[in-house]
Image: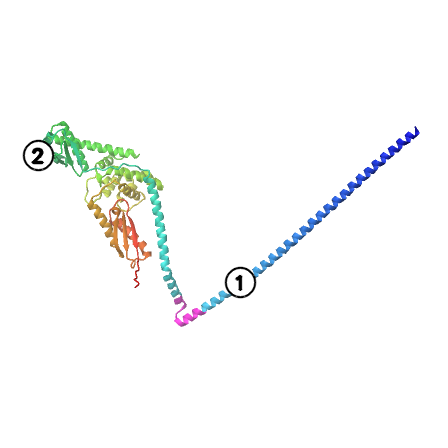
Amino acid sequence: MPVAADQSILAAVAFSSGAIVAYAVAKWRESTLGTLRDARLRAEVELARREATVEAAELHAEAAAEKRDADALRQRAHAEKREVEERAKDLARQGEQLGLELQRLGGISPEQARQLLVERLRKELTGEAERLRAELLERAEDEVEEAARRTLLAAMQRLTTRTTQDATAVSVQLPNEDMKGRLIGREGRNIRAFEQATGATLLIDETPGVALLSCFDPVRRETARIALERVVKDGRITPAFIEEAVRAAEVEVLSLARRLGREAVRDLGLPPMDGEVEELLGRLHFRLSANQNTLAHSVEVAQLCAMLAAEIGLDPTPAKRAGLLHDLGKALEPEAGSSHALAGAALLRRLGEDPRVVNAVAAHHREVDAESLYAPLVMIADAASGSRPGARSSTLESYAQRIRSLEEVAAAFEGVREAFAFQSGRELRVVVDPGKVSDALAGELIRRIRNKVEESVSYQGSVRIILIREQRFTEEAR
């Protein structure tokens, strides 16, 4: 038993010693690893510090180098500035000396020398100034024309009208050939009574079943047509009945004119006008302007005026009234010494119409000065309506006269060698003498030609004027 106890004690002591040794080894290992870690961290920190020191030294060196370069550039700039100032002073001194020498040699005063210099510069720059002026004027005109073209197109694209043409003669159907003899009457008394009452010519020829009425006054022609149809339908063909039928036809035409005038005003969205004005508007339906129905033309001008006014920011109502009433004078009885524009304006002024409308009606053929923008609107719309393809027709004689007038107006200017009208008078080409007309004067000349054409030539739409200045030099080598 004692031996066994001793062994147990020895085993316990051995176990405790082993544990102590293991603990001591573990602590030593931990302490050693911590020391190594600290040493490594200190080494890394020292390395980073050295790298930062090196980078700072490099940056400092670069900054010092840049500063030296900047100082060198500054010193060089100051040196160049001083050199420039010295050269300027030298040049000034040389200029003064040359001026004094010039005065001494030429015997002129400083004021005279200054005038000579100014005159020389003026001669040198005159051509350049004229060229610049021509370019600026041309550019301004192009911009204005482009803006006007856009505005006019914007208005015209919104308007769709029907092109109508009337003739100066109408035909009336007859029920049989015997009616022709009855219309003529014994010794022609019936046809004479009819023509005397209506003012129209009754043409009865070999065309079967047709009688032709001819009259340049559309109102009388319409009256004659209605009266003849009534006489033919009734069958009683006597001078007395013919006169009665003509009176009834005149009343019917007057009633139709009033109705057409009211409808035109109402269709345009305008308030009712004076009864006399509406009747005259209706009478325009029976009148023609170069084979264009005058009432339809007036309505179209009113619509164009309203659209153009809206495009440029004006009140469309006065513009519409001015466009509708601009040809009102054509329905009035002719007055000595008064055109249709002035006669219509006088009537509207007497009836208390808006002064802007009265002036636009009076000025639409440039017989009086325009007092507002509504007058140019009526001029533009009137020209646009009349220049539509097929709107109006003209004779060969009037066409030749218009072409001849355009060419004569252009040829009358000094420096113009030849003038040719093309495209039915829509284009005028002017050839000038390059020895008499310079490039700078060409722009002024073409504007003068344009103004003269507008003043002296009557035309519809617009005329494009092209000025041609060509100079050729020819030599022959042998």
Label annotation for residue 80: 1
Disc 1 marks which amino acid? Glu
Magenta segment main secondary structure: helix
Residue 33 colored in magenta in the image: no
Q: Position of residue 200 (x, y in %)?
A: 14, 36
Q: On the rendered image, what quadrant is the C terminus found in?
A: bottom left
Check disc 2 and report its element: helix, strand or loop: helix
Q: Which residue is mark 2?
A: 188
Residue 99 colored in magenta in the image: yes
Q: In the picture shown, does residue 37 fall above or below 124?
A: above
Q: Which residues are magenta?
A: 97-113
Q: Position of residue 6 (x, y in %)?
A: 91, 31
Tell me if 103 is positioned left or right of 431 in this view: right
Is residue 42 in view from this perspective?
yes
Q: Position of residue 395 (x, y in %)?
A: 20, 44
**Neighbour tally class for label 1: few under 14, some 14-19, many 20 plus, Cα within 10 Å:** few
Q: Nearer the viewer, residue 21 or 405?
A: 21
Q: On the rendered image, what quadrant is the N terminus found in?
A: top right
